[in-house]
Image (cartoon, rainbow, N blue to C red):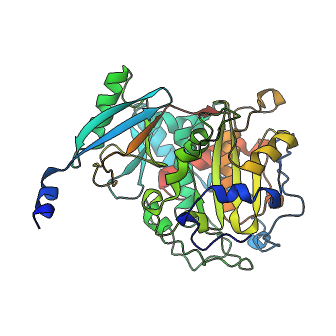
Amino acid sequence: MADVKAEAKAEVINITIKTSDGEVAFKIKKSTKMSKVFAAYAQKKGVPEGHYRFVLDGARIGNDVTAAEIGLEDGDSIDAYVEQLGG
Amino acid sequence: MPIAADPCTDTPLSSSRSLGAAISAGVGAGNDGSALAATPGSTARGGGGSGSGADGGVPSALQVAAAGTPRLAALQAQRLRPEAVVARTPLGPATNLQDLTNRDLGRLLRSGTWLNDEVINYYMLLIRAPAAAPSTAQPPSTPQQPPPQLRTPAAAAASCPAAASSPASPVPPCLYVFSSFFWSKLTGGGARGRFEYGEVQRWTLPRRSYTPDCVLGRELLLFPINHGNAHWCLAAVWPRRRLLQYFDSLGGSRATSDWVLGTLLRWLLRDAEDKGLDGSSCGVFACAFAELLARGVPAEGFRFSQADMPSIRRGMAEQILRGSL
């Protein structure tokens, strides 16, 4: 019972965002909108927002979704991809 | 070696490796960009899919373009900023919105422009959305599926019972489409010798694919493949038929496709850019292949060509805007 309450409050999880050249760790609340995380990541990388596509095990993550809504859990890793082009 | 009922329980994608020996390779061979040949003697649909009528081999985007593209016209009249979102659809949770910007849609509308992952992956969402029940003028024959709702692909896709389509039925195959990042992830960014199974091991977990079932149990798996950031192709895997197909609008080499299909999991390394035809519409071809396969059309039945590209581009744009095929 106590566990349930604590969980409902604000569970903090550690996640990483990965590209081919390394990863960045984030500590976030499960209620955090992913757009905040993505903005922070873009800033850290020195690129404009929208530069990366963030994907969790194959599923693209939208901006307005929260960590909890997409089932992010402690230790999960998000992939950041750049644009793919082709003719 | 039949695929287990729930292949996700152990080594998901490795199953396609063990299929390798039994796999037939299909190589797209359209020098002029016309109908692509495939799978000598191995098309398992046995004519079932070819029963989709006279329009069976034509991408639905063609019909859409012919019937008029009012949404597209309205959009263009608005002169939106490039970053404006012009199409939006949820993936999994209703709040997990996938956006397509005016800039990315615009790639479809300029002949000669390459497509990017945004357009390709968005179109793939449409393909997997209504379990491939076409919403176009004359749908072949799939009344069992309600007409696709606007912008509800994920939910519809979720209801794809593995047993829904028997081989003999004309129903479009129960399918799943992977994102274009799959191939890139699996091959460590497109390196030939690399096989990073662990990187994609979780992609077929139902909670990650937002499906009630493991997608490996489905009849057809589609993989848009980006080649060297310069070329789009499509791989199709029919696990239960032990059939893999590879569709390359620039032809490609048999040796390369054998290798790609035999492992399914190696990166295609073949620059086809100087093959001489419109080197800019491969993404459009790939989407059209995918859409036709999703409708159950066998590859031999494809009937569209380079000349249709401008119309297909417009039609696809319209489909994206209206949120259904």
> Foreground: B12 or B308?
B12
Q: Nearer the viewer, residue B18 or B60?
A: B18
The vertical placement of B288 against B275, above or below, is below
Where residue B121 appears, as percent x and y from the top left, is 54, 46
Judged left or right of residue B7, residue A40 is left
Residue B9 appears in view: yes
Residue B272 location, quadrant: top right
User: Is any atom of residue B66 visible in this view?
Assistant: no
How many labels, in total?
Answer: 0
Quadrant location of the N terminus of chain A?
Answer: bottom left
Q: From the viewer's perspective, is residue B62 above or below residue A1?
A: above
Q: Residue at x 69, y 64 (%)?
A: B239
What is the x, y in percent for residue B81? 40, 31
Where residue B295 appears, as percent x and y from the top left, is 67, 65
Residue at position x 63%, y 71% in the image = B4
Q: Is residue A51 left or right of residue B111?
A: left
Query: B309 above or below B191?
Result: below
Which quadrant of the figure contains the C terminus of chain A?
A: top right
In the visual, does B219 lie left or right of B250?
left
Residue lying at the far right in this picture: please name it. Answer: B41
Q: Nearer the viewer, residue B136 or B88?
A: B88
Q: Residue at x 19, y 50 (%)?
A: A11
Q: Quadrant of residue B143?
A: bottom right
**Nearer to me, A10 or B64:** A10
Judged from this view, the residue extending furthest toward the front is: B10
Where's residue B17, x and y in %?
A: 71, 54
